[in-house]
Amino acid sequence: MRTTFLRLLRGQQGVTAVETALILPVLLFGVMMLFELARISLMIGIGSLALERALQDFRHDRAFYAQTPDVLQDAIEQRLIDSSYGFLNEENFQVDVLAFDNLRLFGGGQADEAEDDNDRSPPVLSVTVDLTQRFMTPLPALFGLGDAFQYQYRQLLGSLTSDQDAEQDP
């Protein structure tokens, strides 16, 4: 019996199978997390591109700045969905629009009728988009990361040239 046990200890049969059984779960975990990270990167890139495309036409339209924040928010949400190649839907993001009548108010100044009447600076819009996407695999949840990742985009819309500058040009 002792010789059989010693022969088993010296034998090399099955070593590869044992090593594979120990390493395979780690490799599978690594590959799954690599795919998860690649998808996160893809979704952040698509969200950034969709937001830029959604806002690019609004930058030059002064009538856009005169609309209410609710109308702006709905228009931006629809353009985000249209520009995201089908990767985003209404459940994936939240759009917040803050409208400021001039640069002074955007900078934190208090509303003052006398100053606001004389201020010819353009209106400024602050657009914030909070993106939420569920993970593909349950692995991040096992490590306490939750079941979704979040990312926030911020864009400022405003024309830094005013009507006063156009009047001074020859």
Image: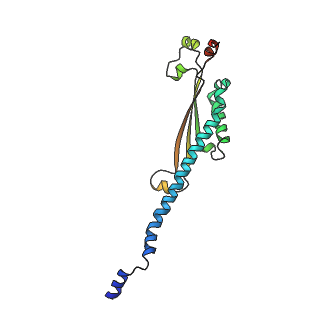
| Whole-percent x, y for residue 38 in the image | 54, 51
Q: Is residue 81 above or below residue 108?
A: below
Q: Is residue 84 above or below residue 137?
A: above
Report which quarter residue 161 is drawn in.
top right
Q: Say whether residue 75 is left or right of residue 129.
A: right
The residue drawn where x is 36% and y is 85% is 7
Report which quarter residue 155 is drawn in.
top right
**Which image quarter is the C terminus in?**
top right
Confirm whether residue 134 shows in the render: no
| Whole-percent x, y for residue 110 in the image | 50, 18
Q: Say whether residue 3 is left or right of residue 110.
A: left
The residue drawn where x is 46% and y is 56% is 142
Residue most extreme to the front: 170
**Which image quarter is the N terminus in?**
bottom left
Give the camera-side residue of 133 and 17: 17
Confirm whether residue 79 shows in the render: yes
Q: How many marks?
A: 0
Residue most extreme to the left: 2
The residue drawn where x is 37% and y is 82% is 8
Give the colouring mode of the picture.
rainbow
| Whole-percent x, y for residue 159 in the image | 60, 24
| Whole-percent x, y for residue 95 in the image | 59, 36
Give the camera-side residue of 17 and 115: 17
The residue drawn where x is 62% and y is 28% is 69
Report which quarter residue 124 is drawn in.
top right
Give the camera-side residue of 143 and 159: 159
Give the camera-side residue of 161 and 157: 161
